[in-house]
Amino acid sequence: MINNKSVVCIITARGGSKEVPGKNIKSIQGKPLIAWTILAAMKSNYIDRVVVTTDSEEIIKVSKEFGADVPFKRPDNISGDKAKQEDAIFHAMEYFEKQEGVKYDYIVILTPTHPLRDEIEIDLVIEALSNNPKAKAYVTMMEAKANPLHCNTIPENKSLAGFLSEDVKLKNRQELPTYYQPSGSTSVIEWDCFAKNGSIFTDDSYAYLTDSISGHDINSVIDFKVAEVLMKEKFHTL
């Protein structure tokens, strides 16, 4: 709780992963991947409840072992490859309201694929929302890995004619504007705002700037190996 606002953390974790089977419970630095996110959330000074929503019995078991609450198993119709995170959040919110008669003020949305995000970042983002009366959501953002001005589509003949604009070609990297992308590590949004908009990106959303380490997202075997190196180098604070 922060300033009399109740806070629930929802960790979304599907069981299926094509590139890295069993990704969310795959061991990294001695713990299942999802455990790092659960432990970070549980160390928060403000989160009242840590909930995992998943369709996997294995993830349910592991999540409970590390202290998370798993009050339901996510339905199959919102758990496939094409399922959206927003659907899982809505389902959890509906469960809290209808089955438990509970409604929270803030929702902290975390994914288990960011093991380098820690409780310090989580609390700072919660504080940012609490301290800004104009905001209804904060989303962690990091500098874009590739400047979109250096990106374009490529035709079938692979020609690069017109790939870069003349203006961009005349400028070095330092002269171009800085672009940002969602890091995916931490989002905090008011319950009513999410219920109304169904998205963390609204006219009342603000950016919380973080770095590429916290924003390191595990989607491949290479991502796993990079994360292990970063954690061994003590970038992780848990």
Image (tube, rainbow, N blue to C red):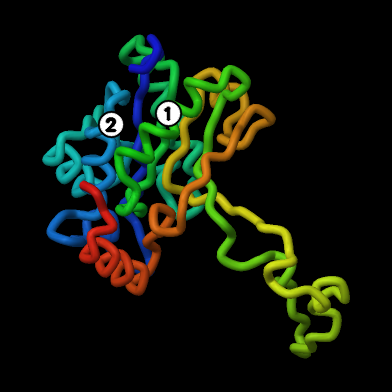
Q: How many marks?
A: 2
- Circle nearer the N terminus (2, 1): 2
Q: What residue type is labelled 2?
A: Ser
Report x, y in % for residue 182. Answer: 54, 49
Say whether residue 157 is left or right of residue 78.
Answer: right
In the depicted view, which residue is nearer to us: 45 or 58?
45
Relative to 92, residue 100 above or below: above
Q: Dot 1: what SS?
A: helix
For the residues bearing labels 2 and 1, Cβ distance under 8 angstroms:
yes
Please name the residue shown 33% across and 70% down the image: 226
**Residue 15: x percent and y percent?**
31, 52
The image shows residue 211 at horizontal and vertical percentages of 46, 54
Answer few, some or many: residues within 10 Å of disc 2's Cα (few below 14, many 20 plus, some between 14 and 19).
many
At x 35%, y 30%, the residue is 9
Q: Determine which residue is flagged by label 2.
A: 44
* Amino acid on which the number 1 mark rests in the picture: Ile
Q: Is residue 117 left or right of residue 215?
A: left
Q: Dividing the image into 4 quarters, which one contains the N terminus?
A: top left
- Around disc 1, counting alpha carbons within 10 Å, would you say few (fewer than 14), some (14 to 19), or many (20 or more)? many
Q: Quadrant of residue 101?
A: top left
Residue 177 position (above or below residue 206): below
Per the image, the residue denoted by label 1 is 126
The foreground one among 95 and 160 is: 160
Give the vertical position of 138 relative to 104 (above or below).
below
Identity of the residue drawn at 47% across and 37% down: 187
Q: Which residue, as the protein is rendered here, is positioned at the far front? A: 174
